[in-house]
Image (cartoon, helix red, strand yellow):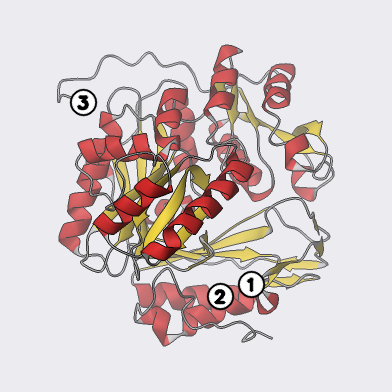
Amino acid sequence: MNGPTGAPSPQPRATPLFRRVLIANRGEVAVRIARTCDALGVTPVLAVSTADRDAAYTHGRETICIGAGRPAASYLQSTALVQAAIQTRCTAVHPGWGFLAENPTFAALCESHGVTFIGPPAHAMRLMGKKTPAKQAMREAGLRLIPGSDGILSGPEQALEVANAVGYPVLLKAESGGGGRGMRVARNQDEVERAYHDAQAEARAAFGDDRLYLERLIVGGRHIEIQILADRYGGVLHLGERDCTVQRNHQKLIEESPAPVLDPEERARTLAAATAAARAIGYVGAGTMEFLLDQDGHLRFMEMNTRLQVEHCVSEMRSGVDLVAEQLRVAAGHPLTLTQEHIELQGHAIECRINAEDPSDNFRPAPGVITRWRAPAGEGVRVDTHVQDGYEVPPFYDSLLCKVITQAPTRAEAIERMIDALQRLECEGVPTTIPMHIEILRSEAFRQHQYDTRTIPGWTPGASK
């Protein structure tokens, strides 16, 4: 494998894979990471809150309790997690996704105590965690950006000046934002000042950082992301792209690969540029670059998530690559086991996120006891879950019950396979989003790509009652 300049990479100074890894996460995330640890002969130790301590997925596993049920008292307690790793003789921590997975302070705290953080180095997380430095780095690496401010806005007056220059509508966005918080739309110049102050107040409350930047709002865009893997020797590759356009309030519902409406030339150009960009910033580990596909067919960089995504399984299904295994090897100092030439992306894969929510009641979360659970199986079907009969869905966390992933030679076949799998998925005791997903998948709007980030194709509130 060659280094950044094309010269042979230095000889890797790898260590054996970790003997014991603390999983600083819960539920489906913990089960997914533990599965790969088992396959590699690594002992996983589960950090659990009091709400998860007796959950069925922890049975037969080594666990350590890190605090009370609410995330702020447990899974967000960086000091307690590092202490738990040391106490259980774990030499590495896998943060999964969510919670502290993109927290550079936690990564640095692990390293300062001799515990390997399984993720990118803290400096790369800091660079990509702040939106404007990240955009500058990506621009220099050759990626297209969404037109907007060159950096942090000095105030509503500058926001108005930039908005008038790039054209309406515009989006005011928090520099430290995420999950749709700290964002406001201004559709004309009369709305800019209020949108600025509203976004600033929400950003201050949510992130302790009220700095804002501005982008032109791409109306009718599609959400595309690229899966990246990199080692510390200059080896970087991609596992293709995923289309995550079907979402609600910036929360993804369905993901698929390849993106069905992406022009092949734009795909090839952006995949190459994203790989080069990751190498240019010295990225290490797994990461995802997120783009908006505008109405001209151009992919424009939005942000980079310096962790695995919930939907990484879609890329695994098409490539046959275990992303968690590669994360562990890279963190231990090994080069990637593959080069780009080895990656063969096959067929079409789709993922549905099944939540304990009632979509007919404005997606009301539905904690409670699952009295019966039967997951589908079969060719081209994968279910990632932590749920079993009797599992109690706690009120403190994300309501995700499972991810159902299907793969088939064509998109149409993958859709039919997914509908069949969802119809065979049995969950009793709490309402779920299964009926909504089936309606989406059956709709002509979904099958004919007649949707964007503003719409949920084939489904309207109340339709699943």
Q: Is residue 171 left or right of 379 when viewed as pictured?
A: left
Question: Would residue 210 be seen by someone viewing this image from the given angle?
Answer: yes
Q: Which mark is residue 433?
A: 1
**Mark 3 surroundings within 10 Å by alpha-carbon count, few (fewer than 14), some (14 through 19), many (20 or more):** some
Q: Residue at x 35, y 28 (%)?
A: 231
**Is there CB contact under 8 Å for labels 2 and 3?**
no
**Is there CB contact under 8 Å for labels 1 and 2?**
yes
Q: Position of residue 154 (x, y in %)?
A: 40, 39
Residue for badge 3: 4
**Mark 1 surroundings within 10 Å by alpha-carbon count, few (fewer than 14), some (14 through 19), many (20 or more):** many
Q: In what element is the residue under mark 2?
A: helix
Q: In what element is the residue under mark 3?
A: loop
Query: In the rendered structure, which amino acid carries the disc numbered 3?
Result: Pro
Q: Residue at x 35, y 71 (%)?
A: 220
Counting residues from the start of the chain, the first of labels 2 and 3 encountered is 3
Measured in 3D between alpha carbons, the distance from the residue under mark 2 to the one under mark 3, in whole angstroms, is: 43 Å
Residue for badge 2: 437
Residue 429 found in image quarter: bottom right
Query: In the rendered structure, which amino acid carries the disc numbered 2?
Result: His
